[in-house]
Image: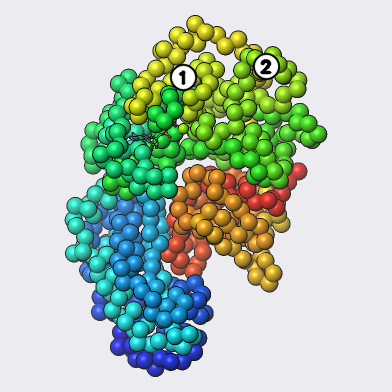
Amino acid sequence: MRNVADLEQTLGHIDGRGYKAYREIRGAWSFPHFQLHVDHVQGDPFAAPSRLRAIVPAEVTRLPQEECRPGSRAVGVGALLARRFASEARRVARHRGSGKSGSLSMESPGQEVLPQTAVRVDRDGAVEARFTAGLPAAGRRILGRQAAYLLTQDVPAVLGASLLASALNEDTLRKHARVNEDADALRGALGRLGLIAFIADGATLPRRTGVDERPLDAASAVLFRSATSLRVTISLPNAGEVSGMGIPKGVTLIVGGGFHGKSTVLRTLERGVYNHRPGDGRELAVSDPGTVKVRAEDGRSVTGVDISPFISNLPRQKDTWRFSTPNASGSTSQAASIMEALESGARVLLIDEDTAATNFMIRDRRMQALVPKAAEPITPFVDRVRALYDQHGVSSVLVLGGSGDYLDVADTVVAMQEYVPHHVTERARAISAEWPTGRIREATSSFAVPPPRIPLPRSLDPSRGRKQVSVKVRDGRRIDFGSESIDLSTVDQIVSRAQTEAIAAAMVLARQRILDGHTPLPDILQRVMEIVAQEGLDALDHRRRGDLAAFRPFELASALNRIRSLQVAG
Ligand code: ADP
Ligand code: MG
């Protein structure tokens, strides 16, 4: 294999030549302590930067093997290394010519800890790190010496300061491995305990700002403390006995005054499907992996979804058992999102009044009197939520400060008061009995879960112009898929750009390898998840990308469901 001296010589040789000559550095180079692979060379200084990989053997990293066990621990350590590498790279990156010349970067994980492709930690402690570099040029002429400095000085320095045990605090490393392992164990224990979520005593729930996911500073945050009668104790592999609030299966209401912390609790449950980095405050706040946040999204498109359990007899609408619209209303979008979540296998629904359609959630006695049922297409969620659990085992957690009608249908009621939860189910029962709502139940039939839809391959076309596959992620929240643009800004459980990238790649894979016009959507999702589980995220894209992160079937489904060109069989 060519070595560092060869690389320097090659770069000296192509110095001053046209940018295309950078192609000569493609391939593998052996450095004293690692191997550098130049997988892709950018076409010009303004194009997406070049893709590189460093492979560092175990005897160089000296990472303790017990912290690198495949699964939870390796994922936790991988996230730590990626975050370190990314921040070291930011320190040395600088403009060294035109366009992206001199950039050096790695996809950095946020607060959530997900399996990702930026850094992979092997069981023996070897590490593969994937990053990008802007190969330097003046105009379009190669700056060979600058490139040599970037690749032979900066890259080894960044790597040495981020991927080696000697550069990392032993406690920090251990913590990243073990905290992640505990979170997985905790989530795994929920089902046995009849719980859908758990929030540990002492957790920090509020975030710094609406756009900053780091924890609110310790001086301002009120630490979480369970209501006494909801407190459960769970034994974890590393942390030992941990106590906190268990949210039981069934229908749970979170009530309380405005600004008392209701939405913050729900947001914690929403994010609790993922693990969090040490120091986040939500390390031991987890929810059932089948938990799906549902909200109203007027304007979204809906394709062939049976929303008839909630909505029927729409004015001038055909059937609502195959409801399609390019422009849903608040209530129809929320109904569609619930039915889609059930189709994808959701076990828990989360709804916050802040982002729900009021007429979908409630219809009180007076409105029932004023607008007769015959003139109202909507059967409100309050009349369906019980059947969802009783007949299908699908739990709901609802944040509702404004409607007492739900007290009649709840199994558990938690009241937030100055950020502290209180268990008020008994009182809620007494109030229900004392002040009947007088409502007439609007749903008498059982809740029939419709058969799954079958997406048609031709309606999902990633090509554009002469390009067979033209798929691009914009702003982390939008996928340009062929000539379609999919808006995911309202999908609250997509937490990183890398996740969106992986979902986009999964859509292409699903289209190319799975969709055949006969396979129902849930089977498509399952097949994709199996491929990722067996072959890793690299199965989604063979270009050895470092910018992919794990996702759930629900988020993949939400992207598929929002393609405006989507068509389903029948
Ligand atoms: P609600 O939904 O009940 O109106 P929110 O959950 O939106 O209330 O919280 C209101 C404000 O209080 C937010 O700015 C939030 O960050 C903050 N907050 C929530 N929980 C806590 C807490 N435990 N400690 C300190 N501030 C909190
Ligand atoms: Mg709120």
Residue type indicated by callout 1 = Asp
Local packing at callout 2 (Cα closer than 10 Å; few below 14, some 14-19, many 20+) is some
Q: Which residue is drawn at 65% across and 14% down?
A: 366
In this orientation, does residue 56 appear?
A: no
Of labels 2 and 1, earlier in sequence is 2
Indicate the position of residue 80 as horizontal and vertical percent values: 30, 56
Beta carbon of the mark 2 residue lies under 8 A of ligand 2: no
Residue type indicated by callout 2 = Gln
Near-viewer residue (455 or 296): 296
Q: Where on the picture, by quarter, is residue 549?
A: bottom left
Mark drawn on residue 368: 2
Indicate the position of residue 88 as horizontal and vertical percent values: 30, 66
Q: Where on the picture, by quarter, is residue 79?
A: bottom left
Q: Residue at x 39, y 73 (%)?
A: 103
Residue farthest along the top direction in this orientation: 434
Indicate the position of residue 357 as horizontal and vertical percent values: 60, 32
Q: Which residue is drawn at 35% across and 81% down?
A: 29
Can you say which quadrant of the picture contains the C terminus? top right
Residue 537 as seen in the image, left or right of residue 446 = left
Mark drawn on residue 512: none
Beta carbon of the mark 1 residue lies under 8 A of ligand 1: no
Indicate the position of residue 111 as horizontal and vertical percent values: 36, 49
Residue under label 1: 411
Mark 2, secondary structure of its residue: helix
Instruction: Please tell me in which quarter of the rendered image ligand 1 is found.
Output: top left
Mark 1, secondary structure of its residue: loop
Labels 2 & 1 near each other (Cβ < 8 A): no
